Image (cartoon, rainbow, N blue to C red):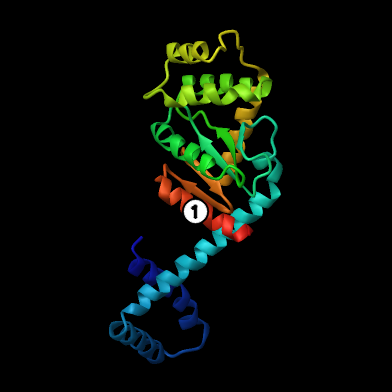
Amino acid sequence: MKPTLLALTLLGTLLTPALHAAPFTPEQEARIKELIRETLVQNPKILDEAAESWEKQNAADQAAQLGDFIKGNQDVLFNSATSPRLGAKHPKLTLVLFTDYNCPYCKQFDPAVAKLLKAYPNDLGLVIKLLPFKGQTSAKAAQYSLTLWQQDPARFLALHDKLMSKQGMLTEADINKALAATGNVALKPEGKATEELRNSLRIGTLLGVQGTPATLIGNQLVPGALPYEQLEQLVKTELAKLG
């Protein structure tokens, strides 16, 4: 909806009760409408200002709701033992990345996230939530990598990077090659991995994740594969808030 149209809608909603709440005569009501019309014609910026104010208030309300949700779900977002965790052991700021091994934008974004963790080794942590949105091989790859995390966390990153670096949709053969290349031929997916995927899908849905990648930075859910500079600036802003 364009700002002007939005403002007109809001204005109409607000004025209609006012015009009918008081016992105005038809002549008085007509004159009020004329005054409103004259004011808008003479000051057209009023509509844009009204729309901008409404949008800011709406954004503030959404941010507050998101903040409340994050506070109420700290453990599943940041402290789940079954979710892969990278970066600083005791970070000032922990990001939560919703990602998918078959998502081309996730593959594009992953190096930027890795670069960021290297740039802030003492301040930044990362929790990975795998969302297998893109087919059966996405889910299968996620089950293998999550099982490896649960069995031997130190070996997780090598397999994760191998799966994420394969361009295009993964095939069964691609997954097997990644397992072989990282010394995990004997790895068998466990039930805990499936449970972790269910939990990630649940929390992602409740959080409002509509696609991958999506990154929780402070109290802000940021969709898409951001350029590194933009991602770093968001992180710097959050770190500055934390002191």
Quarter of the view holding residue 195: top right
Residue drawn at x 62%, y 31% as measured from the top left: 84
Amino acid beneath label 1 = Leu
Q: Where residue 167 sits: x, y (%)?
A: 37, 24
Residue drawn at x 65%, y 45% as measured from the top left: 91
Q: Is residue 169 above or below residue 92?
A: above
Q: Is residue 149 above or below residue 242?
A: above
Q: Is residue 49 above or below residue 243?
A: below
> In front here: 4 or 221?
221
Residue drawn at x 39%, y 31% as measured from the top left: 104
Q: Where residue 62 sits: x, y (%)?
A: 55, 58
Element type where label 1 sits in the image: helix
Q: Is 76 displayed left or right of 179 in the figure?
A: right
Q: Residue furthest left?
A: 41
Q: Where residue 199 sits: x, y (%)?
A: 64, 33
Residue receiving disc 1: 234
Residue drawn at x 39%, y 45% as measured from the top left: 227
> In front here: 119 or 155?
119
Q: Is 215 displayed left or right of 107 in the figure?
A: right
Q: Is 17 displayed left or right of 39 in the figure?
A: right
Q: Is residue 15 above or below residue 225?
A: below
Quarter containing the C terminus? bottom right
